[in-house]
Amino acid sequence: MFGIFNFLRRTPHSKYRKSNKPLASQENPSLSNKLSANLHYLHQLFNLTPDLVIRQVHSDQGATYAALVYLDGMVDKASIHNNILRELAYKTPDEISVGSIHKASDWRQVEDAIFQGNSVLFVDGQPEATVYGTQGWPQRAVEQSPVEASLRGAHQGFVETGSQNVAMIRRYIPNRELKIKELTVGRRGRTKISILYLADVARPEILQELETRIRKVDIDAIMNTGELAELIEDNPFSPFPQLILTERPDTAASHILQGRYIVVVDKSPTVMAAPAHFFTFLTSVDDHNSRWMIASFTRILRFVALFISLFLPALYIALISFNYEVIPVQLILSIAETRSRVPFPPILEAMLMEITIEMMREAGIRLPSPIGQTIGIVGGIVIGQAAVQAGIVSNIMVVVVATTAIASFLMPNYDMGAAIRLLRFPMMLLASMFGIVGIVTGAIALVAHLVSLESFGMPYGSPLAPWRFAEMKDMFIRVPIWAMLKRPKSTGATQTVRQKNHRGDEDS
């Protein structure tokens, strides 16, 4: 019992391995100056690798003096044929111009280069191999993100190639202060990770902490950005996301301009922004593309939807089970009439409907798009109507669950929306045991938890805790853009001023 308690109290960074040694020690010999020895070791290293291609290059006398090695399907074959094999007939390996060119002196470098889609040229008599950048693996075209749709913003989304994602961010910030720091994570699948930031704006201490946590990750492979976020976040036992995940280049560039760090994981169409605070997850990409009054109304509506999604089912249970005296007489008579045929208590009725809604939501996501929409609409109507006619749930419960589901769709961030839906269930249990007192107690516990959270040393509850009135301009409402002259302090930005005051002399 105490062992489990101590495990839950651990932070993910206090128990990391102190050493970054490989999971299994592997020798790393240097290349030989004999082509035959290198090819023999190559066949041993890439045993049972049928997609490995070895193109031997012959001299005028017919003897083999070089060999070009690459993985079929990972390279651009036209570039290899036109720019390497043809030119080897009258040029030296160093004179060939194709992509990036560098030397490899040991087998670890050769292995990494081949698996990254490069072509490696071994020349007889040379103890080094020449690596040509000929990557050409299958990839999809740039298209709109299906998760973060925008009405008036850009219609570009990240892809699974890290270099292209970095290039899309560079288009938004073509500035020499945009720096990129590259790291590699993984022992079996070595994944390149790029950290993007503005050197004159972002806080260096956050970069140092971010880099330290990434370097301490000792794992076989990183498949996507969500895995890396879970490995380096501050509190893994919190239901709230502590790192921002986005698939939009314009959103990532906006976070960089505010002083945050963007982490691009190769082979993942999602990038990560740090540090984050709670109210960042309630802002939409369209908030700064619409007029400030419309955006402010939408944002207030979003906060109202947050409270409805979190507390409405619990409030229904509390009022029906404990505090029914606060309900108007005519309404309570109507509720009593609809519940007269329901044999279950309110908590069981609410749990049944909420779990059904969550199952339909998950089914709509996993099924193909036309079928998923049909399941969501037809399934909700049919199941709700049938449940009422069968006397399993009441009409008022169907209204409460439908309102809660609609409110949860207003969350612009998927991770935060999932966290709110998860917290709805403990709130319902507290309401069934203690009524409104239980709801208030749960709300206080949530606020205390939010205030105690941090994201890379920055307070998660900012700008409410600590209180920063200047940052209220872009929280519950959005003031005009010309009035937001400074970057938020919650990002840790060292350069606070982001624009001049064009409409007055007062400091904003």
Image (spheres, rainbow, N blue to C red):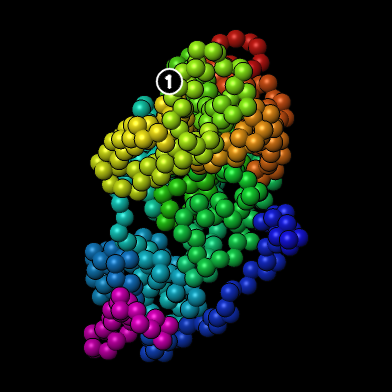
Left or right: 475, with 336 as reference point: right
Q: Indicate whether 130 appears above or below 205.
A: below
Dot 1: few (<14), some (14–19), or many (≥20) neighbours within 10 Å? some
Amino acid at circle 1: Ser
Quadrant containing the N terminus is: bottom right
Residue shown at the point (49%, 17%) measured from the top left: 333
* Rendered location of residue 321, percent (x, y): 59, 29
Quadrant in the picture for residue 148: top left
Tag 1 residue: 290
Pick whichever, 224 or 256, lies toward us. 224
Q: Is residue 484 visible?
A: no
Q: Indicate whether 152 appears above or below 174.
A: above
Pick whichever, 241 or 182, lies toward us. 241
Residue shown at the point (32%, 77%) measured from the top left: 52
Does 55 appear in magenta? yes
- Local SS, label 1: loop
Q: Which range is magenta?
A: 44-67
Q: How many marks?
A: 1
Left or right: 303, with 454 as reference point: left
Left or right: 487, with 62 as reference point: right
* Rendered location of residue 475, percent (x, y): 58, 24
Residue shown at the point (30%, 79%) measured from the top left: 50
Q: Is residue 129 visible?
A: yes
